[in-house]
Image: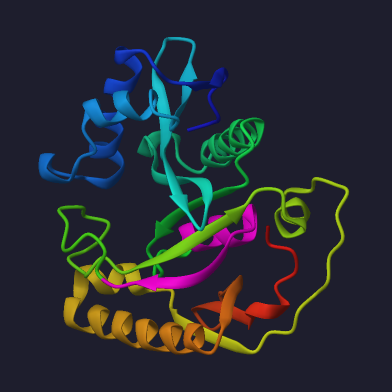
């Protein structure tokens, strides 16, 4: 499908818009009812300092959405971005990035400078989007966060997650987004963790082998984090059919806040 002729990014509050976010969850992830974020949670989210943004076309159809709840840690308020999904027929059109940029702008307008979320370490598209296109860093690995879910995308694997930290006003994020002025100091890569690009096919063909890949990636990433390294880059090597996380020393990650 070509890019929609007209859609706009809106802060969603109307029930008719929020209810479409339930349909998007089913279409994008294949969730059964037990794993859905319910309508009432989305309604509450907009009323307690959270966010629900949507890409809405001229016919009031929500093409994609994201939501975030307010959080508090280390004496600071931040946002935990829980879900972002786009209807399958509108994916790969830049809607996700526009939603995230709107999320960033609104958060900054309220004095919030950090948004966090989690993502599957073996999802190549999500890793590239988060690290290379948004500028997040990762320094925490969560094992089987949600248990085994009904999503076809998870393929029956434990729901291991990397915690993404998006420091909205950091030089790193400004550099990635092309927003100035900023200063930047390149850091040296000290470790790499790779996995095969065919992991999605492996989930459906050989679940045991896919779980083994996950366990090996888990062990290596946890080892790197224990050495005070953080994920700051992501590579896709089409020649060798590998994806790689690149780690730099945490103390050298310049001005992340």
* Percent of width and height locating residue 155: 21, 63
Magenta highlight on residue 68: no
- Going by the picture, which residue comes out furthest to the front? 75
Looking at the image, residue 4 lies above or below residue 132: above
Find residue 91 and report its horizontal and vertical position in percent. Answer: 45, 40
How many numbered tags mark residues here?
A: 0
- 13 is higher (above) or lower (below) than 231: above
Residue placed at 40% from the left, 59% from the top? 119
Q: Quadrant of the C terminus?
A: bottom right
**Point 32% across, 67% down: residue:** 200
Question: Which of the 4 quarters of the picture holds residue 107?
Answer: top right
Residue 1 vs residue 166: left or right?
left
Rendered image quadrant of residue 16: top left
* Magenta highlight on residue 142: yes
Image point 56% across, 20% down: which residue? 8
Magenta part of the protein: which range?
125-143
The residue lying toward the viewer, choosing from 150 and 12, is 12
Left or right? Give the position of 208 relative to 194.
left
Q: How is the image coloured?
A: rainbow
Between residue 28 and residue 162, name the one nearer to us. Answer: 162
* Residue for point 43% across, 20% down: 12
Vertical order, 210 against 126 (above or below)? below
Q: Position of residue 158 (x, y in %)?
A: 22, 70
Q: Is residue 45 above or below residue 132?
A: above
Q: In the image, residue 55 lies at what x, y percent?
A: 48, 26
């Amino acid at each position: 499908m070509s890019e929609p002729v007209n859609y706009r990014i809106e802060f969603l509050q109307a029930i008719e818009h929020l209810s479409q976010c339930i349909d998007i969850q089913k279409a994008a992830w294949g969730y059964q009812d037990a794993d859905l974020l319910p309508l009432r949670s989305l309604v509450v989210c907009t009323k307690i300092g959270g966010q629900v943004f949507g890409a809405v076309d001229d016919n009031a159809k929500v093409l994609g959405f994201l939501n975030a709840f307010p959080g508090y840690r280390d004496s600071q308020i931040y946002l935990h971005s829980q879900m972002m999904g786009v209807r399958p027929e509108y994916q790969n059109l830049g809607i996700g990035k526009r939603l995230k940029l709107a999320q960033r702008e609104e958060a900054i307008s309220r004095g919030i400078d950090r948004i966090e979320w989690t993502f599957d370490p073996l999802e190549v598209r999500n890793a590239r989007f988060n690290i290379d296109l948004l500028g997040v860093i990762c320094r925490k690995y969560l094992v089987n966060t949600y248990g085994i879910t009904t999503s076809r995308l998870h393929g029956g694997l434990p729901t291991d997650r990397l915690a993404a930290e998006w420091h909205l006003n950091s030089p790193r994020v400004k550099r990635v987004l092309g927003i100035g002025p900023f200063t930047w100091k390149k850091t040296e890569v000290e470790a790499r963790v790779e996995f095969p690009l065919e992991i999605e096919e492996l989930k459906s063909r050989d679940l045991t082998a896919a779980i083994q890949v996950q366990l090996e990636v888990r062990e290596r990433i946890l080892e790197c984090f224990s050495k005070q390294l953080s994920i700051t880059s992501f590579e896709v090597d089409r020649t060798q059919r590998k994806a790689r996380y690149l780690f730099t020393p945490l103390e050298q990650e310049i001005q992340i806040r």
